[in-house]
Image (tube, rainbow, N blue to C red):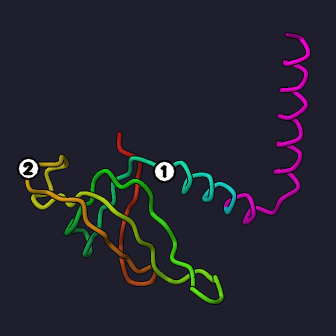
Amino acid sequence: MARMKMLKAVLGAGVVLTLGACTQETQNQIGRSVQNWTGTNGILEVYAGPTLIKRFLEVDKLSTALGTDDKTPRPYRYGYGKIDLNLNGKVDPGEKRVYFEISDYSTNYVFYEAP
């Protein structure tokens, strides 16, 4: 039992030291990779000025598009979620799961984990 605790402590210290040596951007990329792998139960809201115009519920993840050949990040994000047609914050009958894309340059959006 004590050996397992020691092993966990050593592995934990190794992870902390490894992440501590990474740049902030590398740490962010690792975090995004873990989040993309695990997914989240998110809500995406799209705004036109101060007005909410679209809402997607039960978004499993919001991913950054990558180029097919060069693998560089593209200026848009995509995902799947259930569209909230009446903007009431819950999935009603007839509100289906849809694919969406949002631009990093021109789309005002907020993505957050469902409360």
The secondary structure that most of the magenta stretch takes on is helix
Q: Which mark is residue 31?
A: none
Front residue of 113 and 81: 81
Query: Where residue 65 sits in the image (x, y, percent)?
Result: 51, 77
Q: Earlier in the sequence, mark 1 or mark 2?
A: 1
Give residue 2's quadrant in the image: top right
Alpha-carbon neighbours of circle 2 within 10 Å: few (<14), some, or many (≥20)?
Answer: few
**Which residue: 27% across, 59% down?**
56
- Tell me if residue 27 is in the magenta stretch: yes
- What mark, if any, has residue 39 been given in the picture? 1
- Identify the image quadrant of the N terminus: top right
User: What is the x, y in percent for residue 27?
Assistant: 73, 58
Q: Quadrant of the C terminus?
A: top left
**Residue density around tag 1, few if under 14, some if 14–19, many if 20 or more, within 10 Å:** some
Horizontally, residue 93 falls left or right of residue 103, namely left
Q: Nearer the viewer, residue 103 or 94?
A: 94
Estimate the spatial distance between the alpha carbons at disc 1 and disc 2, rounded to whole Å: 24 Å
Q: Amino acid at mark 2?
A: Pro
Residue position for label 2: 93
Q: Amino acid at mark 1?
A: Gly
* Left or right: where 38 falls relative to 109: right
Q: Is 15 covered by the magenta stretch?
A: yes
Q: Is residue 79 left or right of residue 47?
A: right
Mark 1: secondary structure: loop
Determine the residue positioned at 19% across, 69% down.
53
Q: Secondary structure at mark 2?
A: loop
Q: Quadrant of residue 45?
A: bottom left
Extent of the magenta region: 1-28
Q: Nearer the viewer, residue 8 or 42?
A: 8
Vertical side of 113 occupied by 106: above or below: below
